[in-house]
Amino acid sequence: MSATANPIANSSGSVSNLAVQNLSGPYITNTHGGGVSCQGATLSVTPFATLQDSWKEPYEDSYNDPVFDNSDLNNDGVLDNPGSVLYYKPTRTGQKTNHSIGWGISMNITIPLDKRHNEGCLKAASTQNQINQQLLANKRLDFEMARLKHCAEQERLGVTFHPSSPAAKLCEDIVVANPHGVIPNHQHSIQK
């Protein structure tokens, strides 16, 4: 009896490398005016989703595996029909389509390492904010002084807003009195 070796080996595989790149970008910058800009720590959160499909072409779900005639009918040790195929046996290939879905969140925290620069910038920002508040107070004072001046001049000229006018509120708290050193018009009675 003799046997013919007919080894069959099927192997398939795939490797997928997936990289998620998280770019933090520039630091968050706060601008306070006067050229003062401070950068702070940055947290970036990046959600991601991936979908992967893989398949083989041409797709074959099975193949016909030959079954050989290994019979020795007369028992002489020699095959009677060597190489003769008795029939074909359908064999599955195991070939499949692969689907893969991945998702996740990537986070990155970026913190400036120069503490001195950060503290100096925050002091400069505080100073700049105080300057801005003082400038605003100066503008408010300028507005109130201009309102006082114009309302008083118009009151002395005898021109005022009508009491029902919305603009009458602009001058309603202005009091006009005689200037220093000026005697108001008055009358005295003379007794005989």
Image: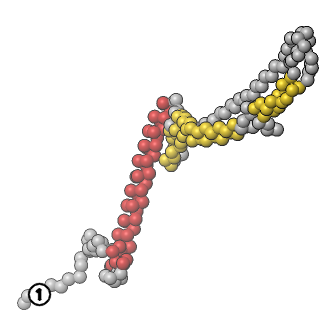
Q: Quadrant of the C terminus?
A: bottom left
Name the outermost residue toward the top.
76
Name the outermost residue toward the left.
192
Q: Residue at x 35, y 69 (%)?
A: 148
Residue 8 or 175: which is nearer the viewer? Answer: 8
- Say if residue 153 shows up in the picture: no
Residue 44 or 159: which is nearer the viewer? Answer: 44
How many numbered circles are shown? Answer: 1
Q: Residue at x 35, y 81 (%)?
A: 165
Residue 150 or 181: which is nearer the viewer? Answer: 150
Q: Position of residue 53 (x, y in %)?
A: 70, 39
Q: Quadrant of the N terminus?
A: top right
Q: Quadrant of the rendered structure where residue 83 is? A: top right
Name the outermost residue toward the front.
74
Q: Position of residue 100 (x, y in %)?
A: 65, 37
Q: Amino acid at mark 1?
A: Ile
In this picture, residue 85 sits left or right of residue 131: right
Q: Residue at x 37, y 61 (%)?
A: 141
Q: Quadrant of the rendered structure where residue 73 is? A: top right
Q: Circle 1 sits in a helix, a strand or a loop, which is it?
A: loop
In this picture, residue 108 sits left or right of residue 50: left
Residue 128 or 6: which is nearer the viewer? Answer: 6
Whether residue 141 is situated above or below residue 5 in the rendered picture: below
Mark 1 closeness class: few <14, some 14–19, many ≥20 residues within 10 Å:
few
Q: Position of residue 40 (x, y in %)?
A: 50, 38
Whether residue 21 is situated above or below residue 73 in the rendered picture: below
Disc 1 target residue? 190
Q: Residue at x 75, y 28 (%)?
A: 12
Q: Position of residue 43 (x, y in %)?
A: 52, 38
In this picture, residue 178 sits left or right of residue 37: left
- Say if residue 16 shows up in the picture: yes
